[in-house]
Each structure stands twice: as structure tokens, then as C-alpha cells.
Image (tube, helix red, strand yellow):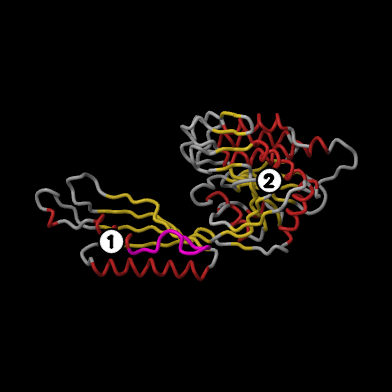
């Protein structure tokens, strides 16, 4: 069974390795070394995603997580308070996704120990640890799928306990808009200027934003505009997204965005207004009877866990894996409040995740 002391030590050691998106080399080296020591054949694709394989008997099982974290994630000082691991409050904890990485490593360590006993076979394992998941699933989009043979698996990247299984996730369209007006001195001749900020504000008041319905959301998360307070702002950038688990609704809201931007362009002919909407990943949804759900449920119930199937408003590497014919469902990794400085990891839940992962590899 999973070793609690070893798991805590591994989790803290991984958390202390800085790995913001685009800076994964150090954590990659550490993970590669650990996986090699656990008997895995370690490889990398052309994007430097980490792919490790452990031989076994039967159908291969994919175990996936990501190596990067969000900011502020440098110099993390993890503090263990009873069953809860947190940062000192100045950074994120990095449980997303260091807890997922730890779960896989601990499960493989348990399998290695179990393998010393005669008559203890296990499934072949294919570990995929991706780079640059945060901010657009970049690593998995560049994954060399010719190096992966598994058709089912688990993505360790969900909030909450391991029995929380994400069976539906939305598509995402990324929205980027550029508005160019005309600069002028705000005190001497403001009449000669065209304020890009004012045009952006008009657009923002008309866009359908927030929760549209239970499976559809839209957001403008960033605006970058202006140079100085005494200059009529010439340019403005709007950066946002639209998500839905229903492709027709995604298209509908995207169409509404385009209509509103076209109307703004017509109302401000002297300004230049451009809008770009690009899909970054597609939704997936599986029924309760799906073979991947059955596989995960069987392992959870072997541990006495009640299975909680849920739909999510967030995306993960699972979305892209599904696009490539791999039914890999996200499960909870014992972490709460992802991407915040009050993020926490519950050790008992991370440990349960490792026990579940071990049961999956053992083919329960």
C-alpha cells in the first residue's frame, strides 16, 4: 500500500522545484530520474513532453499529469499543518499539479515493491507528463501520439478527492480583439482623438459574459490599453474566452460576439476593430456506462469509495487526449483552490489517490 511518509516527502520535494509554464526542465530532470529508478523506460518527444513506459501484462494504461504550474510559483515554501499542506501565502502551493505527479510516482513505487512478490502481475503503464498545460494545453497539443499506444487511462488533474471523476468537459474558443483609435493630447486637443478604451467599454457592455447557462460561459479576462493618463488611448487589447459543452451553443455565443464587434466597427468607421476567435480544444462527454468510467469505478469501489461523476466547466489535457482517441478521464488529486495563494493539498486525499492509481495499475 501507499507509504504516507514517502508520499509527503516526494510531494514537498517536487513542490520546491520551480516549474512555471515554459520552465519545466528542472522538474522534468527530477521526474525522469525517479521514473527511471522505478523501472520505466523514459523518453521525450520533440516538444520535450515526458513519456515513460513500464512493461506489464494486458492492455496498457495511460497515467497523465502536467509538469508546469501557474504564477506566482517561484520559491514556494510548503508548510504542513496536520493533514493540510499549504504555502506561506506569498505563492501558490503548486499542488496543481505536483500532487498529480506525486500520485503517479507513489503508485509506481508501490507496484515495484509489489512486483518483488511472485504472482503479482500488473498492466503495462504509459506515463505522459506534459509541459505548458497551463494557459492552453500547449504540451499535449504538441504530444507525439505515435509514442502512445494506450486507449484508456486517467488524468490526475482534478480538484477535490480522487473519487470525483470528470465525465464531461467543454470546448473552448479563445477570443482576441484589437482596437485602434487615434491618439491625441488629452488636455490640449482631446477632440482629435478616438479613445480605444471607450470603444472597448461600449463593446464590453453588450457582450454576453459570465454564466450563460449550466454548460456555457464567456469571459473577457484581460484588457491592455493606453500609454499615459494625458494621452487619448490609441490601442486596446481584449483577451477572453467562450466555453460550452454544447457545440451549437459555443457557435451561437461566438456568433453573437462577432455581431457585436461588427456593429462597433460600423459605429466607429475611423477606428480599426479586429476580432479573432480560435478553438483551442474540443469538448468530451461520456455516459455512465462507458468502459473508462467502468474501469475507474471498479478501482475506486475496491477501495470502498463511492464514485462521484461530474461535469466540469474547465478543460484539461483530457480534452485533447479524447480528440486523439484516448479515453482518459480526470480525477481529483486532493487539492483545493487551484491557482490561488490559498491553495491547499489534503495529504489523506493525495494518499488515497496513490492507492487508487496503484489499484488501476494492478488491474483491479
Residue 89 pos. (x, y %) = 48, 32
Q: How many marks?
A: 2
Quarter occupied by the N terminus? top right
Q: Residue at x 53, y 32 (%)?
A: 87
- Looking at the image, residue 35 sits to the left or right of residue 169; the answer is right
Residue 199 quadrant:
bottom left
Of the numbered discs in the image, which one, if any, rests on residue 361?
Answer: none
Sort mark 1 into few (<14), some (14-19) or many (20+) by Cα contacts within 10 Å: some
Please state which of the two labelled residues, at mark 2 or mark 1, is closer to the viewer: 1
- Looking at the image, residue 225 sits to the left or right of residue 212; the answer is left
Q: Nearer the viewer, residue 311 or 124?
A: 311
Q: Compute the Cα span from label 2 to label 1.
A: 48 Å
Residue 214 included in the magenta stretch of the image: yes
Residue 335 pos. (x, y %) = 59, 42
Residue 222 included in the magenta stretch of the image: no
Q: Secondary structure at mark 2?
A: strand
Q: Residue at x 42, y 62 (%)?
A: 277
Residue 29 quadrant:
top right
Q: Which residue is mark 2?
A: 127
Instruction: State which tag comes first along the sequence, 2 or 1.
Output: 2
Sort mark 2 into few (<14), some (14-19) or many (20+) by Cα contacts within 10 Å: many
Q: Secondary structure at mark 1?
A: helix
Q: Is residue 102 above or below residue 148?
A: above
Q: Is residue 79 above or below residue 237?
A: above
- Looking at the image, residue 23 sits to the left or right of residue 190; the answer is right
Residue 360 pos. (x, y %) = 76, 48
Q: Residue furthest left?
A: 188
What is the span of residues highlighted in magenta in the rendered image?
A: 206-217
Q: Which residue is mark 1?
A: 202
Residue 320 pos. (x, y %) = 59, 57
Amino acid at each position: 500500500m501507499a507509504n504516507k511518509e514517502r508520499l509527503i516527502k516526494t510531494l514537498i520535494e517536487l513542490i520546491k522545484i520551480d516549474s512555471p509554464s515554459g520552465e519545466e526542465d528542472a522538474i522534468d530532470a527530477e521526474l525522469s530520474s525517479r521514473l527511471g529508478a522505478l523501472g520505466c523506460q523514459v523518453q521525450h518527444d520533440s516538444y520535450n513532453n515526458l513519456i515513460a513506459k513500464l512493461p506489464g501484462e494486458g492492455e496498457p494504461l495511460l497515467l497523465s499529469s502536467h509538469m508546469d504550474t501557474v504564477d506566482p510559483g517561484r520559491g514556494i515554501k510548503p508548510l504542513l499543518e496536520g493533514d493540510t499542506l499549504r504555502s506561506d501565502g506569498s505563492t501558490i502551493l503548486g499542488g496543481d499539479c505536483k500532487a498529480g505527479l506525486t500520485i503517479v510516482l507513489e503508485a509506481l513505487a508501490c507496484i515495484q515493491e509489489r512486483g518483488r512478490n511472485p504472482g503479482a502481475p500488473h498492466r503495462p503503464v504509459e506515463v505522459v507528463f506534459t509541459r505548458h498545460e497551463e494557459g492552453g494545453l500547449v504540451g499535449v497539443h504538441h504530444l507525439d501520439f505515435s509514442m502512445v499506444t494506450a486507449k484508456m487511462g486517467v488524468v490526475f488533474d482534478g480538484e477535490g478527492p480522487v473519487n470525483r471523476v470528470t465525465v464531461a468537459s467543454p470546448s473552448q474558443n479563445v477570443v482576441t480583439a484589437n482596437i485602434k483609435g487615434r491618439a491625441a493630447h488629452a488636455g490640449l486637443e482631446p477632440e482629435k482623438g478616438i479613445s480605444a478604451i471607450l470603444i472597448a467599454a461600449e463593446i464590453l457592455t453588450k457582450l454576453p459574459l459570465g454564466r450563460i447557462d449550466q454548460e456555457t460561459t464567456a469571459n473577457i479576462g484581460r484588457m491592455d490599453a493606453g500609454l499615459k493618463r494625458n494621452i487619448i488611448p490609441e490601442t486596446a487589447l481584449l483577451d477572453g474566452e467562450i466555453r460550452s459543452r454544447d457545440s451549437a451553443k459555443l457557435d451561437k455565443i461566438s456568433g453573437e460576439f462577432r455581431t457585436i464587434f461588427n456593429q462597433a466597427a460600423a459605429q466607429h468607421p475611423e477606428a480599426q476593430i479586429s476580432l479573432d476567435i480560435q478553438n483551442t480544444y474540443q469538448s468530451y462527454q461520456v455516459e455512465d456506462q462507458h468502459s473508462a468510467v467502468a474501469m475507474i469505478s471498479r478501482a475506486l469501489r475496491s477501495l470502498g469509495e463511492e464514485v462521484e461523476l461530474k461535469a466540469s466547466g474547465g478543460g484539461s489535457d483530457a480534452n485533447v487526449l479524447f480528440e486523439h482517441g484516448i479515453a482518459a478521464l480526470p480525477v481529483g488529486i486532493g487539492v483545493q483552490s487551484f491557482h490561488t495563494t490559498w491553495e491547499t493539498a489534503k495529504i489523506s486525499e493525495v494518499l488515497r489517490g496513490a492507492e487508487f492509481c496503484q489499484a488501476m495499475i494492478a488491474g483491479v
